[in-house]
Image: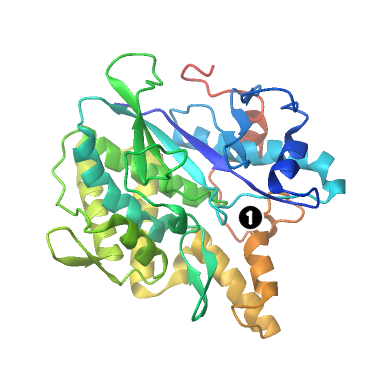
Amino acid sequence: MDRRIWLESEYGVAGNLGPPDEAARYLLRPVIPRDQGGPAVLRNTARLYLDADRHPVYVTPECDRLVDLIAHDKAGERILEGLFAAAEPRGIGLFKNGADAAGGREHYLVGQRVEFGRLADILIPFLVTRQLICGPGKIRQTRNGAAYCLSQRSEHIWESGPASATRSRPIISTRAEPPAGAEGFRRLQVTVGDSNMSETTTLLKIGSTDLVLRMIDAGTRIRDLTLDNPIRALREVSRDPTGRSRIRLAHGTELSALEIQREYLTRAQAFTGRNGADPVGQRVLGLWERTLDSVAAGNLDAIASEIDWVIKYQLIERYRARHDLPLSSPRVAELDLAYHDVRRHRGEYYHLERSGAVERVVRDIDIFEAKTIPPILGRAA
């Protein structure tokens, strides 16, 4: 089944307008008047609204092609950047990150015939360890000092699922809202994901997940990797960028995040070998394998232009060495946040992009068009 996918990207707001929700309302006032209820539907059929925690949320249109999804996700940054231009004199800052429980949700169209318990058993170990290949990185303050972690979202997830995703923040949930408008389908929501700045990291995050869901839908046999405690494992994986810490499985054995991800990759390679993969799928598989190989070898330079947590880690380490700063320095914390600034003239990620230090998936013209044109396929058009 060709799976329609879409993203929600939540943005953190900081400013001098008092509480963050006031700053967020001020930022979105051109498209969501104060007396208007519900989301605004934009020209490209994306939705823009304030969530229950008063974060701005941009929801891409439904996309059948992964490259379209990336273009529309980046178009959301451009749209909010335009709104920011009017708000900036008031001292508002806008960041695409999940450091304060905001994050990036993913939605996938899945078949009803797959029992949710089986889907969760296979998918949750993958999602818990997926942050090793697509986390955005974060400096976490602990009792023992500052530490660099893989994920911003992992500290804010409290349930495996399938509880209400809005308040309890499970890893995954399912809703009886068939996006295709037909019986036999349902919406799978992945709540554990982080928002990414890197286009190639988004490619790997969504592309690898889509491959795992396709394998589940096809009935592919996958080794039992059910976790003993998924929430504890989620935090353990985030706190170990080497991917080598042992995670306890439900049947008592222990595996590392690297080993669990390698198991899914091997199955995906065999699956695509039998069923074929388009050039985008081949790129996903190649980047997936290269990321695991690089982390295992401790050679992060090999993925230093493609994987968010590595890009930011090396940016921070260069800055610390240049200024002789500890990881706990407030100046380093500012750099950590500045990486996610969506203003292209201010954001550290975009400084790297202009210098050619990060890889791309889509062109600027694709992003520009996605601001106003919905995807060609699907009900959005």
| Observer-nearest of 77 and 189 | 189
* Residue 287 in picture, x, y percent from top left: 39, 54
Residue at the farthest bottom position: 324
| Observer-nearest of 153 and 225 | 153
Residue drawn at 55 percent across, 52 percent down: 198
Q: How many marks?
A: 1
Instruction: Tell me: residue 138, above or below residue 90.
Output: below
* Residue 17 in picture, x, y percent from top left: 80, 48
Task: Answer left or right for 374 relative to 21.
Answer: left
Kindly state the secondary structure of the residue where label 1 is placed. Answer: loop
Residue drawn at 48 percent across, 26 percent down: 62
* Residue 36 in picture, x, y percent from top left: 70, 22
Residue located beneath label 1 in the image = 340
Instruction: Tell me: residue 34, above or below residue 74.
Output: above
Instruction: Tell me: residue 302, above or below residue 133.
Output: below
Any part of residue 82 in sight: no
Any part of residue 319 in sight: yes
Residue drawn at 27 percent across, 53 percent down: 125
Task: Answer left or right for 318 relative to 92.
Answer: left
Dividing the image into 4 quarters, which one contains the C terminus? top right
Dividing the image into 4 quarters, which one contains the N terminus? top left
**Kind of residue sitting beneath label 1:** His
Quadrant of res 189: top left
Residue at the farthest right position: 89
